[in-house]
Image (cartoon, grey):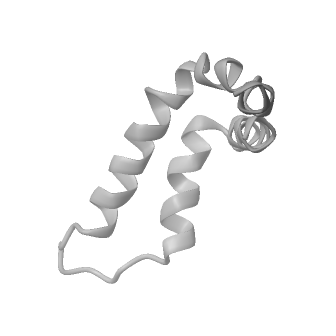
Amino acid sequence: MLRDMRHFRKLPGLMENPRLFTEYPRMAANIVGDLFTVDGGPVPPLRKTILSHAKKIGLVNLLKDGIKGATAL
């Protein structure tokens, strides 16, 4: 048990990030909505769709939160 507590000791700091519960779920929903919208036009590349939504949050914020999440786990 103590080993598990040491392993996940940084996880509470990650869970205090408000973007984790507000902006990232909204971004995921918007990306999926864009991917499955049928409007008769050509489908934009997946990378372009994801990057357009990621830029709204900020690429630096995504990078910081990703690194913080990877080190917490």
The one nearer the camera, 61 or 7, is: 7
Q: Residue furthest left?
A: 39
Residue drawn at the location 60% of the way across and 16% of the way down:
16
Q: Quadrant of the C terminus?
A: top right
The one nearer the camera, 33 or 64, is: 64
Q: Residue furthest front?
A: 1
52 left or right of 29 in image: right
Q: Quadrant of the N terminus?
A: top right
Rendered view: 13 above or below 73: above
Q: Position of residue 52 (x, y in %)?
A: 53, 54
Q: Position of residue 38 (x, y in %)?
A: 18, 73
56 left or right of 38 in image: right
Rendered view: 44 above or below 19: below
Rendered view: 72 above or below 18: below
Report how many numbered discs are placed on residues in the image: 0
Residue drawn at the location 48% of the way across and 64% of the way down:
49
45 left or right of 61 in image: left
Residue drawn at the location 71% of the way across and 38% of the way down:
69
Q: Position of residue 22 (x, y in %)?
A: 43, 26
Residue 36: image quadrant is bottom left
Residue drawn at the location 38% of the way across and 38% of the way down:
26
Residue 71: image quadrant is top right
Q: Position of residue 61 (x, y in %)?
A: 71, 34
